[in-house]
């Protein structure tokens, strides 16, 4: 108990009780920021097309698989037109792109605005995007621009990330990183599909208590040595798998990392050389 004249409360030093943030910066509401970098009809169409394609691939309701490309943001911005032309010609595959770096450092107003503008540039070229969900409040500013979100290994155990993902209007990809976290990723997928009640930043800039309906469109990214199981998954391999069972029955596509669009095309063509891919596509 705390008593007057003591230097702590329940053993906690006064310095800890009096701790204050070193700096405080006001952020605009999501609505204010969106007004400065608005999505046009072309961008909204690209986002919707990407979401539908990802949902169809992950649920197995369509004939196409999902190709998740990981590209450095500078290369993506420079080559978005080239990528858009490539994906429009690709048969049997729907393409999403995950930028490998943010548009700017920091998380202030200017950084968020630059990130929106970078995403809008990609969408104008017809390239749908997958956003890595680390900073929770980012989705209030960016959710209208992304066709899927990815929970990386650093957050798949986070209950609040799972709760937020359960309320998003787009598919969720869960990356375990290594085989030791595979079951955690599968548990996270089940949690994302469930209903939750939690506080969330709203478009007006207020915090509201949200009750999600659950997000059924989830898949796990499997690397080498990870057992496929029956849950929907994407293979995150740089080389074609040696085992046919990695594809069946729940494999919904591939995750490839490259330094440029041309390098991504070459890597994807090497996959095509394998009879396994030709038979599965």
Image: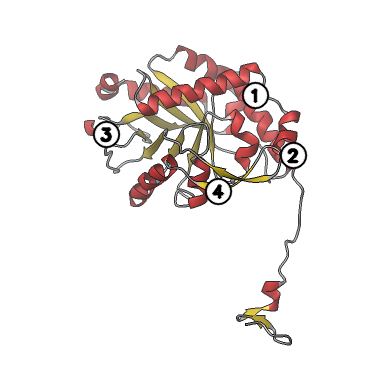
Q: How crowded is mark 4: few (under 14 residues within 10 Å), some or many (20 or more)?
A: few
Q: What element carries label 2?
A: helix
Vertical placement of 201 versus 272: above or below?
A: below
Q: How crowded is mark 2: few (under 14 residues within 10 Å), some or many (20 or more)?
A: some
Q: Where is residue 212 in the image (x, y as percent from the top left)?
A: 51, 40
- Please tell me whether mark 2 or mark 4 is closer to you in this view: 4
Residue closer to the observer: 123 or 77: 123
* Residue with the mark numbered 4: 198
Q: How far is the residue under mark 2 from the one under mark 4? A: 28 Å
* Residue with the mark numbered 2: 110
Return the disc, 1 or 4, that comes first in the chain's sequence.
1
Identify which residue is drawn at 26% across, 34% down. Answer: 246
Tags 4 and 3 in contact by the CB under 8 Å rule? no
Quarter of the N terminus within the rendering: bottom right
Q: Where is residue 105 in the image (x, y as percent from the top left)?
A: 67, 44
Q: How far is the residue under mark 4 from the one under mark 3? A: 36 Å
* Residue with the mark numbered 3: 246
Quarter of the C terminus within the rendering: top left
Quarter-of-image position of residue 77: top right
Vertical placement of 196 versus 131: above or below?
A: below
Can residue 178 be spotted in the picture? Answer: no
* Residue with the mark numbered 1: 121
Vertical placement of 190 versus 88: above or below?
A: below
Tags 1 and 2 in contact by the CB under 8 Å rule? no
């Amino acid at each position: 108990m705390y008593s007057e004249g003591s230097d702590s409360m329940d053993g906690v030093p006064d310095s800890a009780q009096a701790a204050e943030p070193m700096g405080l910066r006001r952020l605009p509401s999501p609505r204010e920021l969106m007004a400065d970098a608005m999505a046009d009809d072309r961008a909204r169409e690209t986002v919707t097309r990407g979401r539908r394609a990802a949902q169809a691939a992950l649920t197995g309701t369509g004939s196409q698989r999902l190709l998740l490309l990981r590209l450095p943001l500078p290369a993506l911005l420079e080559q978005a037109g080239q990528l858009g032309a490539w994906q429009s010609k690709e048969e049997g595959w729907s393409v999403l792109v995950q930028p490998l770096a943010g548009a700017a450092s920091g998380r202030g107003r200017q950084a968020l605005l630059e990130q929106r503008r970078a995403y809008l540039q990609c969408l104008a070229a017809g390239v749908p995007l997958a956003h890595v969900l680390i900073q929770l409040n980012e989705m209030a500013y960016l959710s209208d621009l992304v066709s899927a979100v990815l929970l990386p290994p650093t957050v798949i155990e986070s209950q609040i990330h799972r709760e937020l993902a359960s309320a998003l209007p787009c598919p969720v990809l869960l990356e375990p990183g290594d085989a030791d976290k595979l079951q955690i990723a599968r548990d996270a997928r089940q949690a994302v599909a469930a209903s939750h009640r939690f506080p969330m930043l709203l478009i007006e800039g207020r915090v509201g208590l949200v009750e999600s309906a659950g997000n059924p469109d989830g898949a796990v990214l499997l690397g080498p040595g990870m057992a496929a199981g029956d849950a929907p998954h994407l293979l995150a391999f740089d080389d074609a798998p040696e085992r046919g069972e990695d594809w069946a029955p729940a494999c919904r596509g591939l995750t490839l990392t490259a330094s440029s669009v041309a390098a991504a095309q070459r890597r994807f063509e090497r996959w095509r050389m394998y009879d396994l891919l030709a038979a599965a596509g």
